[in-house]
Image (tube, grey):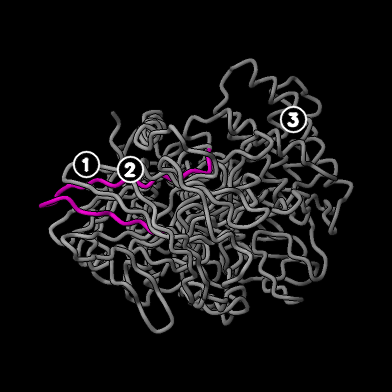
């Protein structure tokens, strides 16, 4: 049996409602759906729910069962374990009975009230819109009643519901299974509660408050409907497994389903090339992003809770989410799907949740395809079927993309006379720094962007290597010539001799000289564009002004446009998305560059940097890595609580580039701090591990 890494919250955190309601747990089902809330039990987002089903995987998400509130009835005394926010009030205070929280393979809660100790485990079943809620009476002086009250939302996950007359106020309860279709067009909901009695009491509960939505400048109140309560007797040592699902659970055993799911996760860890607490936790986190589409093909979700599959994010994440975990077949499916989606040399930025029609409005997704193909080739070995895939699918797709870029495609994307890539039109944002508010493009990057041309150079180099691999020497020689021309032009155009680093964007006579992290891709991709001297200068500048314990800032703090915190309503947040906000995924190319240009010392430094991320596992999404953090200490986590490329890039470096060094021993050798205070300094100065 493979042990899971264990994250434990102490009593001080659990007793603090503000802290415990900002720590979130997440269980995903491999389809795009999930169960998730806060450690306190209080929902703080519209996206929280016990069963958020993907009705058209990975989209069509609906919050079906919002909550399943618990109460213990012990010798005529009622002890409510739930916790809810309402306008100006918290009721009840169930968090005060929470004595323990652990995240290993699953989130586990331990409650103590009236002499009873009750343990609850939540499990999302892979490949199904099914959530298990498992209860065990660890200790009890006498038999007691466990009361469960379901609260129905039955809505799109982006929406909120108010009390209405359309909801079906009665369901059917037979042989331990309750079933109801809340609204026409909404999937039927099943609750299997063996041994329970059902007591109908249909009514609306009003004005649940979700504070995280209010902080984001959005509506934060919702009404939820309950059909009644379920009651069952428990004694010390007994357990009950509840199944919440969109399919009839009659005859299924919740604990058997849990064992099957735990074995699946154990197998994932067992397949890793090495196991450390950090790599194991990241591997379990990575597993949450790999999902199966309704067409049977797998894809990678960009983040939870509100992202679906995005072209750029999927391809950046592919090496870490699939290849480092030994899931080459999944990588192959994703690359094949991407190849089939190429249009005029471009890959979609994202797929619509409504009709799956792709949106071709990104310049770099198609270029990341080459990097993903490079990593796939590294992991493919000499397997004949994989070689055929490289030759017959990936190579022709790469040729097509390059040819379209050379002749010119949408949005002014074209190879210029100097061999570099020009992209963009006024009012359109094509790079990963894509924040836009109405007609305001926050970070306009029209022209020749530094990371786009680093990707273009890599695309040419990778294509040339594939052409060599499959005996096309004349074509390879021609492509190598284009790559060398681009490299020379890149060094002439982007190198800022005065600042000893690279400029961010060049558009004719206009130059954006802001210090941003995009330049790290010039030395952190498979093929570096800079000499060792220039690369070391870039690393020095990035380390000095952009590096933090949780990622790279998107803008120099000394820049007048710098935003230290990502907060407020949509306008304020989008205005600061790339103006100083820290992105963890950028640690991937940064650490790759360290290893490439600083050898063993760089490898040790990269290991130290990545080991620091364990402090973040207990900061926002328990056991995973956030989308972004504030630019200033203490670098509060923001955005999505779980982001694919944040997890993927850390895993890629740890498992593909650090080598067999045991990271835990390395941490001890180098005196890596472990306390939160050391990991997340409160000083306003830049912290560089």
Residue 140 painted magenta: yes
- Whether residue 649 is visible here, answered yes or no, is no
- Whether residue 554 is visible here, answered yes or no, is yes
- Residue 395 marker: 3
Camera-nearest label, 1 or 3: 1
Nearest the viewer among 594 and 264 is 264
Left of 395 or right of it: where is 548?
Answer: left
Q: Where residue 466 sits in the image (x, y, percent)? A: 70, 28
Q: Where residue 683 sits in the image (x, y, percent)? A: 33, 76
- Residue 224 marker: none
Real-space CA distance between mark 2 and mark 3, rounded to the nearest whole angstrom = 59 Å
- What range of the chain is rendered magenta? 128-149
Disc 2 to disc 3: CB gap under 8 Å: no
Tell me: residue 416, above or below residue 482: below
Question: What residue would you read off at disc 2?
Answer: 195
Disc 2 to disc 1: CB gap under 8 Å: no
Tell me: residue 35, above or below residue 83: above
- Residue 238 marker: 1
- Of mark 1 and mark 3, the one earlier in the sequence is 1
């Amino acid at each position: 049996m493979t042990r899971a890494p264990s994250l434990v919250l102490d009593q001080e955190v659990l007793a603090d409602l503000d802290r415990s309601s900002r720590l979130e747990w997440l269980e995903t089902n491999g389809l795009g759906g999930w169960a998730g809330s806060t450690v306190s039990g209080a929902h703080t987002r519209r996206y929280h729910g016990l069963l958020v089903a993907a009705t058209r995987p990975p989209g069509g998400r609906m919050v079906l069962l919002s909550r399943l509130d618990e109460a213990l009835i012990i010798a005529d005394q009622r002890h409510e374990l739930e916790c809810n926010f309402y306008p100006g009030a918290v009721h009840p205070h169930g968090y005060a009975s929470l004595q323990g929280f652990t995240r290993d393979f699953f989130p586990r809660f331990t409650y103590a009230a009236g002499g009873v100790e009750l343990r609850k485990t939540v499990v999302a079943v892979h490949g199904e819109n099914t959530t298990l809620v498992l209860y065990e009476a660890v200790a009890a002086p006498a038999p007691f009643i466990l009361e469960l009250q379901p609260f129905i939302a039955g809505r799109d996950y982006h929406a909120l519901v108010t009390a209405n007359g359309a909801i079906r106020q009665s369901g059917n309860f037979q042989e331990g299974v309750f079933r109801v279709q809340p609204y026409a067009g909404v999937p039927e909901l099943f609750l299997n509660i063996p041994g329970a009695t059902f007591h109908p009491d249909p009514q609306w509960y009003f004005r649940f408050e979700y504070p995280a939505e209010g902080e984001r400048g959005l509506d934060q109140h919702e009404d939820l409907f309950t059909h009644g309560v379920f009651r069952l007797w428990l004694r010390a040592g007994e357990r009950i497994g509840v199944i919440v699902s969109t399919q009839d659970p009659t005859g299924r055993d919740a604990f058997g389903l849990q064992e099957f799911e735990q074995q699946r996760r154990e197998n994932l860890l067992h397949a890793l090339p090495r196991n450390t607490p950090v790599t194991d936790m990241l591997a379990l986190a990575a597993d949450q992003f790999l999902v199966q589409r309704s067409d049977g093909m797998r894809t990678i979700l960009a983040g939870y809770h509100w992202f679906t599959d995005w072209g750029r994010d999927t391809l950046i994440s592919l090496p870490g989410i699939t290849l480092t975990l030994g899931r080459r077949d999944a990588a192959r499916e994703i690359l094949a799907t991407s190849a089939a989606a190429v249009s005029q040399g471009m890959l979609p930025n994202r797929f619509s949740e409504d009709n799956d029609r792709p949106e071709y409005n990104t310049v770099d997704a198609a270029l990341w395809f080459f990097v993903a193909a490079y990593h796939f080739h590294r992991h493919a070995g000499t397997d004949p079927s994989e070689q055929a895939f490289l030759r017959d699918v990936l190579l022709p797709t790469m040729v097509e993309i390059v040819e379209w870029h050379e002749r010119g495609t949408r949005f002014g994307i074209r190879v210029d006379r100097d061999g570099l890539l020009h992209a963009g039109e006024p009012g359109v944002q094509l790079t990963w720094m894509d924040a836009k508010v109405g007609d305001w493009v926050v970070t306009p990057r029209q022209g020749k962007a530094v990371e786009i041309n680093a990707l273009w150079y890599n695309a040419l180099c990778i294509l040339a290597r594939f052409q060599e691999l499959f005996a096309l020497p004349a074509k390879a020689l021609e492509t190598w010539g284009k790559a060398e021309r681009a490299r020379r032009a890149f060094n002439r155009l982007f190198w800022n001799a005065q600042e000893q680093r690279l400029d961010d964007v060049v558009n004719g006579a206009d130059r954006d000289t802001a210090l941003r992290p995009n330049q790290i891709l010039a030395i952190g991709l498979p093929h570096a564009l800079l000499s060792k001297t220039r690369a070391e200068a870039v690393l020095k500048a990035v380390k000095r002004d952009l590096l933090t314990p949780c990622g790279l800032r998107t803008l120099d703090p000394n820049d007048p446009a710098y935003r230290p915190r990502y907060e407020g309503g949509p306008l304020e947040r989008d205005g600061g998305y790339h103006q100083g906000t820290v992105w963890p995924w950028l640690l991937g190319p940064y650490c790759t560059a360290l290893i490439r240009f600083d050898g063993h010392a760089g490898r040790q430094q990269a290991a130290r940097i990545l080991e620091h991320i364990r402090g973040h596992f207990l900061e926002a999404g328990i056991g995973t890595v956030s989308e972004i953090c504030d630019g200033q200490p203490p670098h509060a986590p923001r955005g999505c609580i779980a982001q694919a490329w944040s997890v993927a890039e850390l895993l890629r470096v740890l498992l593909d580039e650090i080598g067999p060094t045991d990271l835990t021993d390395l941490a001890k050798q180098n005196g890596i701090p472990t306390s939160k205070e050391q990991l997340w300094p409160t000083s306003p100065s830049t912290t560089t591990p």
